[in-house]
Amino acid sequence: MDLTSYAELAVLLVNRAEDLSSLDTLRALLEETGRTESAARVNRRDLDALRELREELTDVFESASTGDEADVVERLNGLLVRHPVHPQISGHDGQAWHMHLTEGGRVADALAVGSVMGLASVVTGLGADRLGICQATPCRNAYLDTSSNRSRRYCSERCASRANVAAYRARQNKRNGQGQ
Ligand SMILES: [Zn+2]
Ligand SMILES: [Zn+2]
């Protein structure tokens, strides 16, 4: 079981705040990401719990982006206590036996366990500096840095090129200002 891939779920929850605005948009998000079964039974309590979880996951990424690794670990440890793993071996849909982190229970619990275990796995396996917040203001999206040289600073290609254009303009303005 590749726990690291679960960390993408945390990124998704942090970055898709607008999809947590209503039950309908949350259902659409779950369907879009292949969680059809969860989409069918998600309810308002799940929505409230996921909004709260999103705040807490955002704080983890914010701490990581400022380099406060002790705070990252403390926050994740708190989340691990509140979202215990209930692993089960599953072999549904003709698949080989594989692990599920949490069977049954509420949709929000399963998503919380997955995203928190995913982040914990990244921090312990790859390093807390792999979690970041996009540096292209005003974007505050979270990202996972899986580059070999830990060079990632933006959530997307779009933000990277926007930041490059802004930096270029700033240099131009400075040059023009000096010329006068
Ligand atoms: Zn499965
Ligand atoms: Zn961004």
Image (tube, helix red, strand yellow):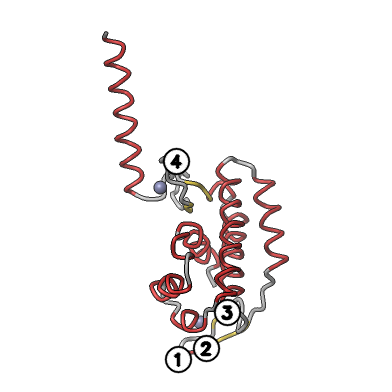
Between 101 and 98, the residue placed more toward the observer is: 101
Give the CA distance from mark 3 to mark 1. 15 Å
Task: Give x and y (percent) for residue 109.
Answer: 61, 74
Q: Residues within 10 Å of mark 3 (few under 14, many from 20)?
A: some
Between 36 and 144, the residue placed more toward the observer is: 36
Please state if 138 lies on the left or on the right of 60 as rendered. left
Where 180 sits versus 106, above or below?
above
Q: Earlier in the sequence, mark 2 or mark 3?
A: 2
- Tell me if the residue at label 1 has its CB under 8 Å from ligand 1: no
Please state if 86 lies on the left or on the right of 24 as rendered. right
Q: Secondary structure at mark 4?
A: loop
- The structure residue drawn at horizontal position 42% and vertical position 70%, both measured from the top left corner, is 25
Give the CA distance from mark 2 to mark 1. 6 Å
Residue placed under numbered mark 2 in the picture: 91
- The structure residue drawn at horizontal position 35% and vertical position 43%, both measured from the top left corner, is 160
Q: Residues within 10 Å of mark 2 (few under 14, many from 20)?
A: few
Residue placed under numbered mark 4 in the picture: 135
Give the CA distance from mark 1 to mark 4. 44 Å
Task: Give x and y (percent) for residue 38.
Answer: 50, 80
Q: Earlier in the sequence, mark 2 or mark 4?
A: 2
Residue placed under numbered mark 1 in the picture: 94
